[in-house]
Amino acid sequence: MLDGSTSGNEPGLSALQNRVSEPADETPSSRFLQAEQELNALLRGLTFGGPVRYIYNPLEYAWDTHRCYVEKYCQTGKTVLFLGMNPGPFGMAQTGVPFGEVKSVVDWLKISGEVGRPAEEHPKRRILGLGCTQSEVSGARFWGFFRKLCGEPEQFFRHCFVHNLCPLIFMSASGKNLTPPELPAAEREKLLSLCDAALCKVVEALDVSMVIGVGKVAEQRARRALSAAGVVNVRVEGVMHPSPRNPLANKGWEEVAKAKLADLGVLRLLSSS
């Protein structure tokens, strides 16, 4: 059995945790980071059996870059939260940023910092941090779309923020990526119930009025989590996931996403014109 503790070479994590836990700085970013640290502590108590062989948590070993992302862009005035499911092996797993394809993170979002490594790595899924040369298609599509639409990241983040429901990435012995829906039912529900509760804290910290799930699973979990918590003033919607596993996304994800965001009234918030 594997547990949810993935601590390895984590740059300055203890000091960062202590800083985040101090309540004096009640900014949206501090409340957001606090919710994530509380979730991390709970996830360390979970155990996972087969088919899971490796667990990475970039909110531990890539905390430095993740904190840079949050403190840079998680400010007041958010209306929309885009919600992904969990990290990809060549995206957030490498950078600590949701949908964090390296070029987008470095060149457009201008994120910097040190990335450590998890305690145990699959030989085919090494963590190279911001030096990783393999692109993640989902992340390149996601951030590339908003780069074209907004021009500068500040335009996007004036009203929006991006977050993943679950910070953990799971892999089989072969290195195959396992999404949370592919986990055994009992383990999956224990995991996602904790993530659902953390999402409610994040929504409260950001004071958004809409959550847009990127993909059906994220949309459904957001709807379920907020409904169970009695949150009635936050609208939950969804947009197609840009994954290359999705044949429809491969036929023109940007056009589909743009039309959906226009229907939701979000596109006008993002346009740089």
Image (tube, rainbow, N blue to C red):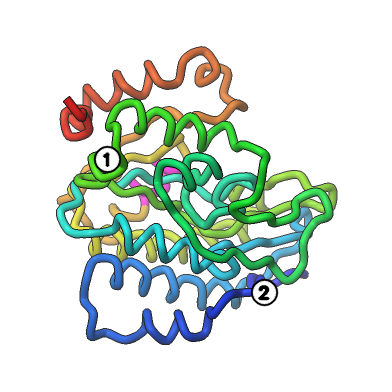
Q: Amino acid at mark 2?
A: Asn
Residue at screen point 52% across, 13% down:
251
Say which mark, if any, is on residue 25.
none
Question: Start and end of the magenta stretch?
Answer: 218-224
Residue 195's image quarter?
Answer: bottom left
- Across and down, in percent, residue 142 comes to 44, 33
Instruction: Please identify the residue farthest to the top as the structure is shown.
Output: 251
Looking at the image, is mark 1 or mark 2 earlier in the sequence? Answer: 2
- Main SS of the magenta part reads helix
Q: Residue at x 61, y 74 (%)?
A: 10
Under mark 1, the amino acid is Phe
Measure the alpha-carbon separation of dots 1 and 2: 33 Å
Viewport quadrant of the N terminus: bottom right
| Residue 181 shows up from this direction | no
Give the number of the disc on residue 9: 2
- In the drawing, does residue 11 fall left or right of residue 267? right
Where 138 sits versus 92, above or below?
above
Percent from the top left, x then y, of residue 201?
Answer: 30, 66
Residue appearing at x 42%, y 68% in the figure: 36
Count of labels shown? 2
Secondary structure found at label 1:
helix
Q: Is residue 60 left or right of residue 232?
A: right
Q: Is residue 106 magenta?
A: no
Residue 173: % across, % down: 83, 53
Q: Eyeballing the image, is 182 above or below 39?
A: above
- Mark 1 — residue? 156
Q: Secondary structure at mark 2?
A: loop
Quarter of the image where one finds residue 23 = bottom left
In reply to whether residue 221 is colored magenta, the answer given is: yes
